[in-house]
Image (spheres, coloured by chain):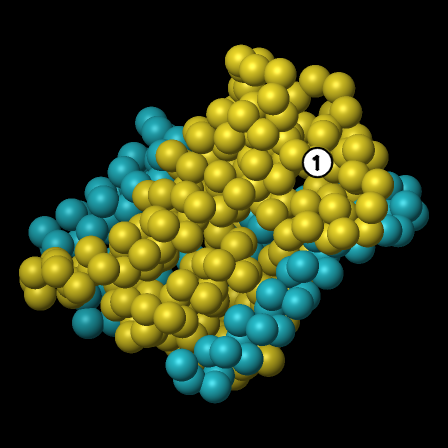
Chain colours: A cyan, B yellow
Amino acid sequence: MSFDIAAIVLFSTAGTYFSRVIPFFAGFLDRLPVFFKRFLQVMPVAALGALLFPGLLTDFSHAPAAGMVGAAAAAVTALFTKNLIFPVLASIAAAYLML
Amino acid sequence: MSRLKTKTVSNNPIQRGVTAGFPIFIGYFPAAMAFGLIANSIDLTLYESMLFSMVLFAGASQFFALNLIASGAAVYEIVIGIILVNLRHLLMSASLSRRTTAASIGARLMIAFGNTDEVFATASSSEGPIETPYLAALEITAWTGWVSGTLAGFIGGSFLPSGLQQSIGITLYGMFAALLVHNVQKEYWYIPVAAAAAGLNTILVRVIHLQPGWAFALSMILASLLGAAILPKVSETFREAEIEL
């Protein structure tokens, strides 16, 4: 096990567990300002936007079309199913055909 | 994977918890397989991949970690990013803590660990107070799906033909795209938020050449502030459970 990976897992687990456990002991967290609640609420969606770009364009610089088509295939498949494995398989298949 | 209905089939809370957790198990297993597969493809060891799933137990942030590890980001950047993505659990645990019957410190420490988005959505949709044995059984069932899926995906990834292995890199982005579609299907005003984050991150990385981890954190925070500001009034009561990650 690399030291870096162990450190990432250890510290991110501590931080994540903190978010999960603190409200069980501190009641004031139900009464957060609405703006802050919305901020926390929308954060994962913002994360997804930032995770997709520019990585999707730069990670496949040798075959940018394969990356775009693979992600598009996953997005379209996701419209029809809640199960995540089908979009994932669709993206592999599409990228494989493009490469 | 959210909004799972629970049928009361038994008075035994543990049995009810396992029954309620089974749909989560079914949903988590393939998603975790994707995690194991990708972890294998970016050269994480089996132990490292399993450790992620066993102790962090936080879906999307694990995929996010793989992305940053592969891009060579610094440890502290990755850690800060993961913690930011998972801050939303504050809201879910706050909501859960109001309905739980867990009185002892030990019980609270334990049930807090497995409070993922899907566990929260399922537990919240049950009637009445949430008993600790029910919640613990629900969480353990979900956790088992996540951990066993990781193992299956990691091992399966080793047997893929090399031609297919080349295209595995896309699965991470396929996951992100699919998750985004599922979220946008629930709330259309998420579109400008995700677009703002994507645009900002692209500018920060490509034009300003910021470190990837910082660029990510900064664009996520700025786009979330925008999202909190533009959120329409009707959605002020929006349910915390409805974000899928």
Number of residues whose C-alpha sits closer than 10 Å to that of mark 1, classed few (under 14), some (14–19) or many (20 or more)? many
SS category of the residue bearing label 1: helix
- The answer to whether residue A89 shows anywhere in this view is yes
Viewer-nearest residue: B79 or B154: B154
- Count how many numbered circles sit on residues in the image: 1
Q: Residue at x 33, y 43 (%)?
A: B30
Viewer-nearest residue: B233 or A10: A10
Q: Quadrant of residue B84?
A: bottom right
The quarter of the picture where the N terminus of chain A appears is: bottom left
In the image: residue B88, left or right of residue A37: left
Residue B14 on image: x %, y % = 58, 30
Residue A97 on image: x %, y % = 9, 51
B84 in relation to A70, above or below: below
In the image: residue B3, left or right of residue A29: left
The quarter of the picture where the C terminus of chain A appears is: bottom left
In the image: residue A99, left or right of residue B192: left
Which residue does the numbered mark 1 point to in the structure image? B132
Q: Residue at x 48, y 86 (%)?
A: A3
Residue B79 on image: x %, y % = 59, 72
Q: Quadrant of residue B49?
A: bottom left
Residue B103 on image: x %, y % = 84, 41
Q: From this viewpoint, which residue is outermost toward the bottom?
A: A3
Q: Residue at x 42, y 75 (%)?
A: B69
Q: Amino acid at mark 1?
A: Thr
- The answer to whether residue B79 shows anywhere in this view is no
Q: Residue at x 60, y 65 (%)?
A: A13
B225 in relation to B124, above or below: below
Viewer-nearest residue: A47 or B25: B25
Q: Quadrant of residue B111?
A: top right
Name the chain under label 1.
B
